[in-house]
Image: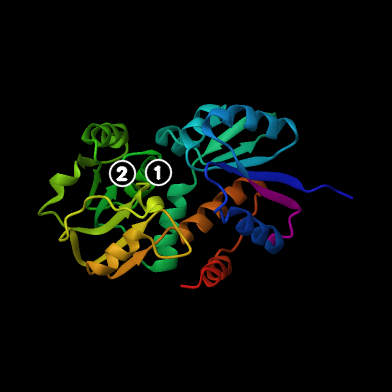
Amino acid sequence: MTAPDQYAVFGDPISHSKSPKIHQLFAEQTQQLVQYTAQLVPAEQFTVAADIFFAQGGKGLNCTIPLKELAWAYAQHKTRRAQLSGAVNTLALQDDGSVLGENTDGVGLITDLINNHGISLQNRRILILGAGGASRGIIEPILSQAPRQLLIANRTVDKAVELAKIFSVVGEVDSCGYTDLCGEQFDVIINATSTSLSGQLPPLPGNVLAKNSCCYDLAYSNQPTAFVYWGLAHGAEKSLDGLGMLVEQAAEAFYLWRKLRPATAAVIALMNAQRGY
């Protein structure tokens, strides 16, 4: 009997991860013999754990908080978008035994916004909250949609300035601190901070949302996140979390590994139904 190909997601924390269920559904849909597990891997153990995983025949890894920058350093080869972002969420074993690093977060976000929610980014004023690894993965794909403005706001302004400088080679990106947002309004606000994991919010002024605006939290939960609630309370036309992005970026990783692109709509519907809101 043929053994299933092994895949996994590494992270810390990881017990909340929905990735094993998503990839199980993808495998059933595409009739692929794969096994996908979630493994608790602290940052200081990442390199050893990844070495062991691939040495034991593993074919591919997803990496989440706080491992994306470490995965970037681990990959022997990187796609262009992974190279630019400085963060990797997908590692794929190649035929020659080397490991390729990719970042599927940005394309997952864009696909969810445009295909699943009908939200165009073209000629829109877009605000990204946070200047960490999550932001790095989404900036270039957002710029590819030709927004009118892309602004990164962060508590530590220097980090936002540095990130804007890195991505200036692919488009115009502005930067500021949260206190500089007073008087500005945006069509799309994306929360790329980790505040939702602790039920907190970035310090946003209440009038930062334009008419018919959208709020999007890269985090997801079985209950609406604090940022999703904030968007609804301040008049956003749509206030969404990152579950759809999670499924879409997983589909991109699955395609990278298996050369098959799973359908996502039914998977997203099932995952939404299971969390009950």
Q: Does any portion of residue 29 appear in the rendered image?
A: yes
Q: Residue at x 43, y 58 (%)?
A: 242
Badge 2 crowding class, 10 Å Cα cut-off, few under 14, some 14 to 19, many 20 or more, is: many
Q: Quadrant of residue 223?
A: bottom left
x, y percent for residue 235: 23, 69
Question: Tag 1's secondary structure?
Answer: helix
The residue wearing badge 2 is: 130
Q: How many marks?
A: 2
The foreground one among 52 and 152 is: 52
The foreground one among 121 and 46 is: 46
x, y percent for residue 207: 15, 61
Residue interval drawn in magenta: 30-38
Q: Residue furthest right?
A: 1
The reply to whether the magenta stretch includes residue 202 is: no
Q: Residue at x 32, y 59 (%)?
A: 227
The label number, if any, that marks residue 134 in the structure image: 1
Badge 1 crowding class, 10 Å Cα cut-off, few under 14, some 14 to 19, many 20 or more, is: many
The reply to whether the magenta stretch includes residue 37 is: yes
Q: Is residue 137 above or below residue 75?
A: below
Relative to 89, is 85 on the left or the right? left
Q: Is residue 109 above or below residue 6?
A: below
The foreground one among 230 and 209 is: 230
Question: Tag 2's secondary structure?
Answer: loop
Q: Residue at x 54, y 28 (%)?
A: 44
x, y percent for residue 270: 57, 70
Q: Amino acid at mark 1?
A: Ala
User: CB atoms at circles 2 and 1 under 8 Å apart?
Assistant: yes
The label number, if any, that marks residue 12 in the structure image: none
Q: Amino acid at mark 2?
A: Gly
Q: CA distance from mark 2 to mark 1?
A: 8 Å
x, y percent for residue 13: 52, 45
